[in-house]
Amino acid sequence: MKIRDRHVIAIALFIQAVCALFFLFDLLSSIFSFRSQPIPWQLREVIEIGAVFGLLLGFALGAFALRRATRKRRHVEGQLRLASGAFSTLLDGRFDDWGLTPAERDVALFSIKGLSTREIASLRDTSEGTVKAQTNAIYRKAGVTGRPQLLSHFIEELMGGIVPSK
């Protein structure tokens, strides 16, 4: 959220709080008789009209800030979808370049997601030894020595670095 948006929201909340306090004070003063002399009705109506306009202004500023925040959220979600699609495309391309088998693709994807060997074996209904053999084949085909380098390979490429493919 930008500083300008924060200021708009703060101003809207301040205006609404002042107006609400006016109406609350007015109500409490009539119940508990705080004032010894009532204010003239013309002045009271002007103050009430001002308070209503203040509440309406606060409402409008709040709606404006909400609309901006909603638009920004949608924009960021769209960018995230694009980035997710780009990452998926990048993974598929590299997996093709390296000649990974379907099973190796699954293991590589789970590995990149951060799952342990035990978790991958459980998800794929295979032994941990099989998963270890598949991860070793993936690292060999990708030209890396382990999971951190494999993940680093994709992160660097997404950030614009040139990573040679095998």
Image (cartoon, rainbow, N blue to C red):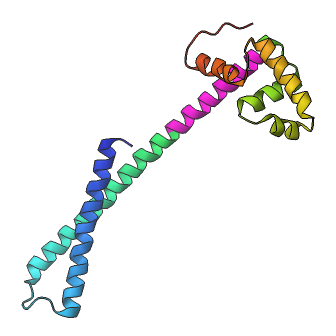
Closer to us: 66 or 157: 157
Above or below, 77 against 156 in this view is below
Quarter of the rendering containing residue 106: top right
Picture mark count? 0
Magenta-colored segment: predominant secondary structure: helix
**Residue 7 painted magenta:** no
**Residue 93 painted magenta:** yes
Quarter of the rendering containing residue 117: top right
**Relative image position of residue 64 (x, y in whole percent):** 36, 50
Q: State whether residue 156 appears in this view.
A: yes
Quadrant of the rendering where the N terminus is positioned: top left
Q: State whether residue 52 appears in this view.
A: no
Determine the residue positioned at 61% across, 16% down. Answer: 157
Quarter of the rendering containing residue 132: top right
Residue 54 horizontal side relative to residue 66, left or right: left
Residue 30 horizontal side relative to residue 98, left or right: left
Quadrant of the rendering where the C terminus is positioned: top right
* Start-end of magenta stretch: 75-95
Residue 120 horizontal side relative to residue 26, left or right: right
Closer to us: 125 or 78: 125
Determine the residue positioned at 21% across, 80% down. Answer: 25
Determine the residue positioned at 64% across, 24% down. Answer: 86
**Relative image position of residue 15 (x, y in whole percent):** 24, 62
**Relative image position of residue 7 (x, y in whole percent):** 28, 49
Determine the residue positioned at 82% across, 28% down. Answer: 107
Above or below, 145 against 45 in this view is above
Residue 107 horizontal side relative to residue 46, left or right: right
